[in-house]
């Protein structure tokens, strides 16, 4: 089972992100379960959502306590929430920011998790460039697909187009693709640097 | 209509006898072939205003709907005296659910009829003043604002009579009830409280709001018939004296109801879409004392230790009604002129 | 068709397939998504003919359903928690009148302290009302149970409540195989009321019944529930034949064949329990699970039969009767009268406290060691409780305990979301 925890703020679509991810996995014939952290949080408050992906029936109903990946939609949560709590030692971290882990003061993550599993991605900027609105969801999911390979980009894009109708869906699918490419290139660079 | 020969005698009322009217203007009750929606044999007290009002209202509604009527009843006297299973006085489909939900249950009935394409079947929901202005008020207001196709009839006897005469939001000031006893410096019910439901109903902009008393049953029937001409939420508030709760003689019910109107204590009017369209003028303005003295619930205002200042306060309230609804034509009656200058118009 | 869909949405779609004619809606978390989705379907004309009525309270919601059902319409509503309590009088009334209303209960805790998260306190509060109460384990079962609920309700003239865990199921997006209209139509015939408000055949419904007949009328309601004990498995069997899916029924056993210890529970926690049971099984422990789908009527015979081989029964429930202990456990104990089974009550998941696999594995281990007491509150922080008891002893005006406990824990809502 692969478990994802998504951190964001109320109104940023963390629940939607988990749902789209689960639909993409489902479309690829896998079992998936997405659910929110069940709060009464208002716009702007820290919120969490979860997604589990497995090839077997998912029976558990507990919150994701030991995620395999953490996605951070809003970088301002870093000092507010214990974002990496329970994250697997071989887990993935994806943060929506144009800055680096060092710049964020998160360089300690390098010693806790495999370096290729740690990625920052300017998803909001990508979204702004793609469709002019600061909604990083689709781009982040594209980045997630590139980082973890748990879902394919095409399944993700189908799920995005299902969720957002018409041109909005198309722009979001493009943003996902752009972020997927960004992360793929970044990882290749990392691999080259590691090889050198 | 079947006509029955009637003896001609003077009833001492202002009502016009049926025999003086053309056939189509005669009351529903004058027809021996009327529907008898509430059949005889029920267990209402002698002189019960509610039984009388309900009988006239429902038979009129039956005629207006060509007998296609369903009634919903709140808990209360009317429900209890009409239906101790297996006996029932209802010859129309009748549903009692709870004390506070009759308007909502009626909404459900109306919705079911609409969804089933039975729009010719109409719904009357009814309750006493407790079930209407107090415990059922939330459901009633909801039914009003959704404009559900329901005629709600409140039979107002100004208190919880079924449970032994306790105060409701419709109990008049100074009236004795079991929970507003005649002890202490301010005996009876408190001034400055209570709920004027006809006006609240009007504030919902429902199609039709009317008040009536059992003193003018022809008027009551006409208002039911008028109400049934509208679709959507409608409200009829009928004053029904309760000999038990009011301490009035069982044979004085009509008289007491007439004085409630003639004193201005109970204004009788009609309104459509929130605007008053007609008022029943006071024919012979009567001081409130004459109304109050017939009722033991006001006995503490008279007798050995009279409380004229409280009676005067009640007269002020009556005057306010007279002014608010123009119950007396100004140029004709000095009393009305006085009333309209001393009170804020509505 | 199998779809990745939110639980609420799956229920709404299935309810729509049942062709309800009057749906009343009042918002309360966590059932709101269900009624919203049904509302959209009515407004779009996808669900027609249907009257969707926005009412002013849950009391009105159930009352409208009562009026509609008594007029021969198939009526549906949904609620949770405080909403169920607010409509309580009408809940009893619907059952007393024998009106086959179907209601989804998105199980949620009852305040004070106000709490929107899941437990089963709301369902327990109306267990004696005369409604049939069915608990769904998964969203698939929640959806399927609604079709069975309408069938059962209308066959017996008894209202049916489909209980599904608030948020945990209602807000979870997972695979649900939705039925098609033709299958539902085959399974669920049009509603033929036993009593109806009809001007051509006037009847009086809901009049007063005195001591001379009240016990018999009440007993008849009990008889209908006893009937349901036969009809629930029969309808589930028919559903299985029609759809190929095992949903509903009275109880479900999992790995109980040779079990010394059987865990009894209701609702979505059964999934996590099964995972924990698998782990304990791998460790060689003989442990199994009994899921109870039909809480009312309580299937005492089926429960007794399913538990007969075990020596220890652990009843894990998301509610308790304050001043007493487990509610479900009491019913299970009744069913096991005269046997030598030891019954352990475990109260868990109150107000949305996560029931984790880790805690369950530890619990089952303790059970196997014979270390469980009669009544245990899972993951209860007794230190926090003790400190508040001390504060109350020390200071008469110690203030609201709920606030004191949270201050003690140093929890803010944002961080709390993680725990």
Image (cartoon, rainbow, N blue to C red):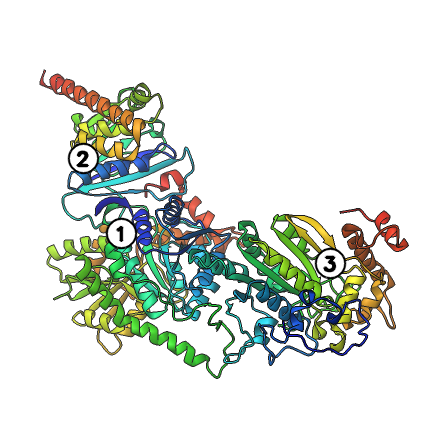
Q: Is residue C336 above or below residue A8?
A: below
Q: How many marks?
A: 3
Closer to the camera in the image, C144 or C116:
C144
* Direction right: furthest residue: B334
The picture quadrant where one finds residue A72 is top left
Badge 3 marks a residue whose secondary structure is loop
Residue displayed at 51% across by 74% down: C207
Cβ–Cβ under 8 Å for marks 1 and 3: no
Q: Position of residue A163 (x, y in %)?
A: 29, 35
- Residues flagged by tags 1 and 3 on a common chain: no
| Mark 1 nearby-residue class (10 Å; few <14, some 14–19, many ≥20) | many
Badge 1 marks a residue whose secondary structure is helix
Q: CA distance from mark 1 to mark 3?
A: 58 Å
Subunit under mark 1 = C
The picture quadrant where one finds residue A21 is top left
Closer to the camera in the image, B121 or C377:
B121
Closer to the camera in the image, C231 or B179:
C231
Residue displayed at 60% across by 67% down: B58
Q: Is residue C396 above or below residue A186?
A: below
Q: Position of residue C118 (x, y in %)?
A: 35, 52
Query: Disc 1 or disc 3, which is closer to the eye?
Result: 3
Q: Quadrant of the C terminus of chain C?
A: top left
Q: Is residue C238 left or right of residue B163?
A: left
| Mark 2 nearby-residue class (10 Å; few <14, some 14–19, many ≥20) | few
Which residue position holds label 2? A89
Q: Is residue A162 above or below residue C266?
A: above
Badge 2 marks a residue whose secondary structure is loop
Which residue position holds label 1? C139
Tell me if I can see residue C138 in this picture.
no
Q: Position of residue C110 (x, y in %)?
A: 43, 55
| Mark 3 nearby-residue class (10 Å; few <14, some 14–19, many ≥20) | many
Which residue position holds label 3? B268
């Amino acid at each position: 089972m692969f478990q994802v925890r998504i951190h964001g703020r109320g109104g940023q679509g963390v629940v939607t992100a988990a749902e789209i991810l689960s639909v993409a996995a489902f479309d690829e014939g896998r079992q998936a379960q997405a659910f929110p952290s069940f709060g009464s949080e208002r716009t702007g408050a820290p919120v969490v959502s979860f997604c589990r992906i497995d090839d077997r029936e998912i029976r558990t109903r507990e919150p994701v306590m030991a995620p395999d990946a953490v996605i951070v939609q809003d970088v301002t949560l870093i000092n507010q929430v214990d974002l990496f709590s329970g994250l697997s030692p071989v887990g993935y971290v994806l943060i929506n920011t144009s800055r680096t882990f060092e710049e964020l003061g998160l360089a300690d993550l390098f010693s806790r998790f495999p370096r290729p599993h740690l990625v920052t991605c300017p998803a909001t900027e990508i979204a702004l460039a793609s469709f002019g609105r600061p909604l990083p969801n689709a781009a982040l999911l594209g980045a997630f697909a590139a980082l973890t390979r748990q879902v394919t980009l095409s399944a993700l894009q189908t799920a995005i187009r299902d969720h957002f109708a018409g041109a909005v869906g198309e722009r979001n699918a493009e943003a996902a693709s752009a972020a997927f490419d960004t992360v793929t290139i970044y990882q290749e660079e990392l691999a080259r640097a590691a090889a050198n | 209509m079947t006509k029955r020969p009637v003896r001609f005698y003077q009833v001492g009322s202002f009502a016009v006898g049926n025999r003086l009217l053309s056939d189509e203007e005669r009351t529903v009750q004058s027809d021996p072939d009327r529907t008898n929606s509430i059949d005889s044999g029920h267990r209402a007290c002698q002189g019960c205003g509610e039984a009388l009002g309900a009988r006239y209202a429902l038979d009129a509604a039956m005629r207006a709907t060509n007998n296609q009527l369903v009634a919903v009843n709140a808990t209360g006297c009317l429900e209890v005296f009409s239906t101790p299973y297996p006996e029932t006085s209802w010859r129309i489909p009748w549903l009692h659910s709870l004390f506070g939900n009759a308007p909502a249950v009626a909404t459900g009935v109306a919705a079911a009829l609409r969804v089933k394409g039975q729009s010719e079947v109409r719904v009357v929901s009814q309750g006493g003043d407790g079930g209407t202005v107090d415990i059922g008020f939330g459901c009633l207001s909801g039914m009003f604002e959704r404009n559900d196709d329901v005629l709600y009839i409140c039979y107002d006897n100004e208190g919880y009579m079924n449970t032994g005469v306790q105060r409701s939001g419709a109990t008049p000031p100074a009236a004795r009830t079991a929970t507003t006893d005649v002890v202490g410096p301010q005996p009876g019910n408190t001034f400055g409280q209570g709920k004027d439901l006809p006006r609240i109903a009007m504030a919902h902009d429902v199609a039709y709001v009317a008040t009536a008393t059992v003193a003018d049953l022809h008027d009551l029937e006409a208002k039911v018939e008028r109400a049934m001409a509208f679709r959507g939420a409608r409200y009829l508030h009928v004053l029904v004296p309760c000999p038990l709760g009011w301490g009035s003689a069982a044979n004085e019910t009509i008289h007491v109801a007439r004085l409630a109107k003639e004193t201005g204590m109970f204004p009788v009017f009609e309104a459509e879409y929130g605007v008053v369209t007609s008022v029943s003028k006071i024919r012979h303005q009567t001081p409130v004392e004459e109304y109050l003295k017939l009722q033991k619930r006001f006995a503490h205002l008279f007798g050995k230790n009279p409380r004229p200042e409280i009676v005067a306060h009640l007269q002020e309230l009556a005057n306010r009604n007279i002014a608010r609804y123009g119950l007396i034509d100004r140029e004709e009656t000095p009393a009305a002129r006085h009333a309209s200058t001393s009170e804020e118009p509505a | 068709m199998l779809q990745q869909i939110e639980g609420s949405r799956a229920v709404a779609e299935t309810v729509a397939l049942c062709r309800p004619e009057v749906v009343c809606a009042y918002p309360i978390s966590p059932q709101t998504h269900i009624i919203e989705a049904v509302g959209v379907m009515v407004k779009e004309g996808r669900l027609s003919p249907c009257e969707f009525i926005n009412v002013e309270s849950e009391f009105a919601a159930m009352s409208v359903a009562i009026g509609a059902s008594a007029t021969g319409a198939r009526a549906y509503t949904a609620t949770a928690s405080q909403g169920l309590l607010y409509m309580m009088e009408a809940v009893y009334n619907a059952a007393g009148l024998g009106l086959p209303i179907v209601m989804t209960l998105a199980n949620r805790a009852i305040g004070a302290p106000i709490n929107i998260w899941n437990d089963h306190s709301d369902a327990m509060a109306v267990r004696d009302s005369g409604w049939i109460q069915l608990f769904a384990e998964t969203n698939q079962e929640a959806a399927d149970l609604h079709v069975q609920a309408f069938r059962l309700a209308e066959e017996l003239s008894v209202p049916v409540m489909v209980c599904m865990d608030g948020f945990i199921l209602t807000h979870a997006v997972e695979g649900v195989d939705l039925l098609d209209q033709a299958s539902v139509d085959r399974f669920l015939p049009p509603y033929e009321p036993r009593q109806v408000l009809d001007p051509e055949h006037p009847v009086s419904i809901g009049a007063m019944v005195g001591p001379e007949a009240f016990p018999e009328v009440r007993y008849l309601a009990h008889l209908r529930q006893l009937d349901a004990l036969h009809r629930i498995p029969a309808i589930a069997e028919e559903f299985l034949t029609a759809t190929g899916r095992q949903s509903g029924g009275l109880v479900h056993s999992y790995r109980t064949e040779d079990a010394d210890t059987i865990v009894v529970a209701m609702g979505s926690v059964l999934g996590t329990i099964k995972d924990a049971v698998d782990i304990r099984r791998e460790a060689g422990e003989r442990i199994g699970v009994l899921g109870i789908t039909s809480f009312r009527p309580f299937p005492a015979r089926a429960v007794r039969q399913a538990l007969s081989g075990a020596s220890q029964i652990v009843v894990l429930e998301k509610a308790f009767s304050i001043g007493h202990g487990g509610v479900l456990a009491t019913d299970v104990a009744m069913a096991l009268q005269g046997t030598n089974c030891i019954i352990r009550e475990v109260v868990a998941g109150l107000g949305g406290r996560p029931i984790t696999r880790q805690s369950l594995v530890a619990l089952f281990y303790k059970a196997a060691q014979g270390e469980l007491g009669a009544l245990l509150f899972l993951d209860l922080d007794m230190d926090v409780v003790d400190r508040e008891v001390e504060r109350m002893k020390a200071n008469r005006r110690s203030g609201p305990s709920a606030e004191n406990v949270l201050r003690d824990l140093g929890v803010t809502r944002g961080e709390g979301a993680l725990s």
